[in-house]
Image (cartoon, helix red, strand yellow):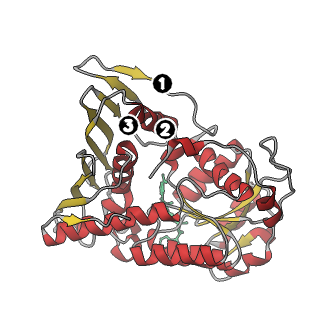
Amino acid sequence: MIDVGRRDFLLSATAAALASGIEPGAWAQGRTAKPLGYAIVGLGTYGHDVIMPQFANCTHSRLAAVVSGDPAKAKAVAAAHGLPSSSIYSYANFDSIRDNPDADIVYVCLPNAMHADYTIRAARAGKHVMCEKPMAISVAECEAMIAACHAANRKLMIGYRCHFEAYNLEAMRLARSGVAGRTRYVRTEHGFVQRDPSKWRLKRALAGGGSLMDMGIYSLQAARYMIGEEPVAVTARESTDRRDPRFHEVEDMIEWTLEFPSGAIAGCQSMYSANQNHVLLMGDLGRIELEPATRYDGNRMWTGKDGREQERTPPPGPGKTQFAGQLDHLARCIVDGREPIVSGEEGLRDMRIIEAIYRSAREGRTIRLGTTA
Ligand code: NAD
């Protein structure tokens, strides 16, 4: 599924540039006269605090608009970033973004259950879409998002930042290089402690699920990109104290085993009651281990065997930061007429497996996964 070899950033199609109205040939030297404009939808922790400062690290992307339910906040944020008042949208007038040629891409940073609606509306407004993980809260929603972007001839990318993060990229490369030998298993755990029961992440209607939707998706992604195959079966078990007010609606801990065609297995876990961030690949010659594995910064990696592991520093990733690499990747895919390496189809693959994980835990049995999952 993930071909590290596809991560080249060679430039080609002037036809795509013409189609998108971007100066032909502008990217021939890896630059464009005007970087593509992003409209950030949802000025919360991720959209505002994490993503917005990253445009300073980008080459091909810039901030063009903000969309918020809080007019005072939107005004202050726009002013702080030098945006005109015409680049401020509310959720009510969001669809009029179709008339703003400055906004090429809509970046959906809203609670999970709002991803599908805003992605579909953005595509209908003629905008390309970057949508945060998890792509949506059901397979049906993911399929509708892909269909809407396809019908509008717009790109759809999922905010899987680890595909632009130096440690994870190097771990994928090492796994494929055979440094650990033949992969026998991957073990991966992701969690962070939720303290406030009133937060949207603990509300089923907005989050679509619990720790699996939010943190387990990192474990699932890591299992797939470290092993480099698609799982054929999943067996899951949930462990949640439903008396705890934080977990009346969504799961706390869930663990699942994925079986892969080569015989490798992945033991994955997520939780909302412990802080954990770990990826381990064991092969018949040794290990590749990341801990922390998928954080914004401070990730670390070791390779080796028998307690003689060597810490490794990876070569730089494709951007100044993983976020800048991710933002610029979509901009360049639009200009070059290429599919993003983490497209809507990739988000859909994860959602199919997530639905199977929940079903397995619910029904207490192994679920076989379709060959196209
Ligand atoms: P947040 O609660 O900090 O922000 C959510 C934003 O949505 C706020 O601006 C809020 O005002 C707005 N909003 C609109 N309608 C809302 C409603 N009905 N209820 C609650 N908020 C509403 O959340 P966040 O941490 O910024 O997460 C947003 C999205 O980003 C989620 O899908 C999450 O999974 C994703 N995320 C991704 C990463 C990553 O590393 N890729 C990290 C954090 C969050």
Q: Quadrant of residue 8?
A: top right
At mark 1, the secondary structure is loop
Numbered mark located on residue 169 in the image: 2
Q: Residue furthest left?
A: 364
Can I make out residue 69 in this image?
no
Work out whether residue 14 or residue 29 is closer to the camera in this orientation and state it. Answer: 14
Q: Which of 178 and 205 is in front in this view?
A: 178
Mark 1 highlights which residue? 313
Real-space Cα separation, disc 1 to disc 2, in angstroms:
12 Å
Between marks 1 and 2 in the image, the one whose residue lies nearer the viewer: 2
Circle 1 or circle 3, nearest the eye: 1
Quadrant containing the C terminus is: bottom left
Tell me which label, 1 or 3, sits earlier in the chain.
3
Q: Is residue 195 left or right of residue 106?
A: left
Q: Residue at x 79, y 66 (%)?
A: 19
Task: Give the residue at mark 3.
Answer: 292
Q: Which amino acid does label 1 sit on?
A: Thr
Q: Dot 1: within a 10 Å radius of its alpha carbon, few (fewer than 14), some, or many (20 or more) residues?
A: few
| Left or right: 134, with 309 as reference point | right
Asked whether mark 2 lies closer than 8 Å to ligand 1, one says no
Q: Residue at x 36, y 63 (%)?
A: 213
State the image coordinates of residue 254 (x, y, percent, origin top left).
Answer: 22, 58
Q: Mark 3 or mark 2: which comes first in sequence?
A: 2
Q: Does residue 46 show up?
A: yes
- Indicate which disc, 1 or 2, sits on the residue closer to the N terminus: 2
Secondary structure at badge 3 equals loop
Residue 276 in picture, x, y percent from top left: 30, 44
Residue found 80% across the figure and 60% down from its top: 15
**Amino acid residing under circle 2:** Leu
Res 324 label: none
Quadrant of residue 120 within the rendered picture: bottom right
